[in-house]
Image (cartoon, rainbow, N blue to C red):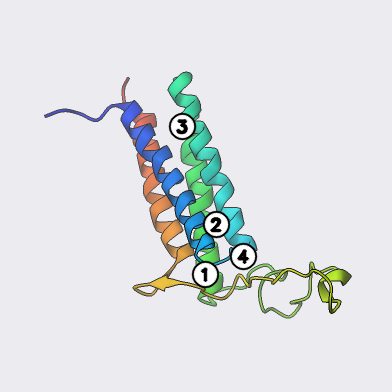
Amino acid sequence: MKTVTRTQLVALAAGGSLALLLGAFIFQALGYPPCKMCLWQRWPHAAAVLIGAAYMGVQTRVLLWLGALAAAITSGIGAFHAGVEYKWWEGPTSCTGGSDALSGLTGSDLLPGSATKVIIMCDEVSWQLFGLSMASYNFIFSALLVIVWVMAARKDA
């Protein structure tokens, strides 16, 4: 039975983040614009992809732990965002229907006829499958990626 190498685990973990990022961009292209918290979830995935690429050149274990950290951060943001969507707790007032819903808006955002952008609310589920939102799926899949990164970090060379 062939064992999985550390490099293969890193490729799987970084590739998983790349797949989640591409999925987010595809959903955006299909007409599901991201909210502020959706955008926050993308940055750690981008970091994980770069960390995976860096590991392929400089194979140091610290990069593996940084990859796990990046995946854990996006998973945590996804969990928090899912909780906001399901109204388990309040989210940022700048993108939720909370008491200060106009926080973060500029005067040009409120003037008629200006080139305003639509504000995508963080506490509204724009798409779901089997009762889970995109943020929920990011939480779950990113948590699995944390496990893969940790497996790679703990694996003997």
**In the rendered view, does 18 fall on the left or right side of 101?**
left
Label 4 neighbourhood size at 10 Å, few (<14), some (14-19), many (20+)?
Answer: some
Q: In this view, does 66 lie above or below 60?
A: below
Split into 4 quadrants, where in the image is the C terminus? top left
Question: Which mark is on residue 77?
Answer: 2
Q: How far apart are marks 2 and 1 (CA)?
A: 10 Å
Mark closer to the chain start, 4 or 2 = 4
* Mark 2 element type: helix
Residue on which the image places disc 3? 52
- Do residues under tags 4 and 1 come within 8 Å of each other at their CB atoms? no
Q: How far across and how far down the image is residue 14, in percent?
A: 43, 38
Question: Which label sits in the foreground, 4 or 1?
Answer: 4
Q: Distance between the residues labelled 4 and 2?
A: 13 Å
Q: How far apart are marks 4 and 1 (CA)?
A: 15 Å
- Do residues under tags 4 and 2 come within 8 Å of each other at their CB atoms? no
Mark closer to the chain start, 4 or 1 = 4
* Mark 1 element type: helix
The residue type indicated by label 4 comes to Cys
Residue on which the image places disc 1? 83
Mark closer to the chain start, 2 or 1 = 2
The residue type indicated by label 1 comes to Gly
The residue type indicated by label 2 comes to Ile
Q: How far apart are marks 1 and 3 (CA)?
A: 29 Å
- Residue at (53% x, 68% y) in the render: 31
* Mark 4 element type: loop
- Residue at (51% x, 73% y) in the render: 126
**In the rendered view, does 151 fall on the left or right side of 79?**
left
**In the rendered view, does 52 fall on the left or right side of 147?**
right
Question: Which mark is on residue 35?
Answer: 4
Question: Which mark is on residue 131?
Answer: none
Mark closer to the chain start, 1 or 3 = 3
Question: Which label sits in the foreground, 4 or 2?
Answer: 4
